[in-house]
Image (cartoon, grey):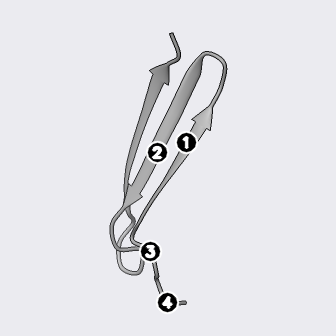
Amino acid sequence: MEVMIETCCGIDVHQKTIVCCILDGPLDTNRPKKIQKTFGTR
């Protein structure tokens, strides 16, 4: 399978928190770097 995107992100919204996640790096040779942060909605 050919890797087309080396960076992707996601966001999960709840009533009290928002969780953001970024995966960055080559997917074909190594595991991508994961950055995840949680923010309060207040």
Q: Where residue 22 sits in the image (x, y, percent)?
A: 42, 51
Q: Where residue 13 sits in the image (x, y, percent)?
A: 62, 31
Quick check: 33 above or below 42?
below
| Residue 24: assigned label | none
Disc 4: which residue: 2
Q: In this view, does 3 lie to the left or right of 17?
A: left
Q: Find numbered disc 3 in the image and state the secondary structure of the residue it sits on.
A: loop
**C-alpha gap between disc 4 and disc 1:** 25 Å
Between residue 34 and residue 11, name the one nearer to us.
Answer: 11
Q: Which residue lies furthest to the bottom in this view?
A: 1
Q: Find numbered disc 2 in the image and state the secondary structure of the residue it sits on.
A: strand
Amino acid marked by disc 2: Cys
* Residue at the (66%, 18%) spot, across then down: 15
Q: In which quarter of the image is the N terminus?
A: bottom right
Q: Where residue 10 sits in the image (x, y, percent)?
A: 53, 49
**Contact (CB < 8 A) between labels 2 and 1?**
yes
Disc 2: which residue: 21
Task: Estimate how packed mark 3 is, as few (under 14), some (14 to 19) or many (20 or more) residues with alpha carbons within 10 Å.
Answer: few
**C-alpha gap between disc 4 and disc 2:** 23 Å
Q: Nearer the viewer, mark 2 or mark 1?
A: 1
**C-alpha gap between disc 2 and disc 1:** 6 Å
Q: Which of the marked residues, 4 or 2, is nearer the chain's N terminus?
A: 4
Q: Find numbered disc 4 in the image and state the secondary structure of the residue it sits on.
A: loop
**Contact (CB < 8 A) between labels 3 and 4?**
no
Disc 1: which residue: 11
Q: Which of marks 4 and 1 is in front?
A: 1
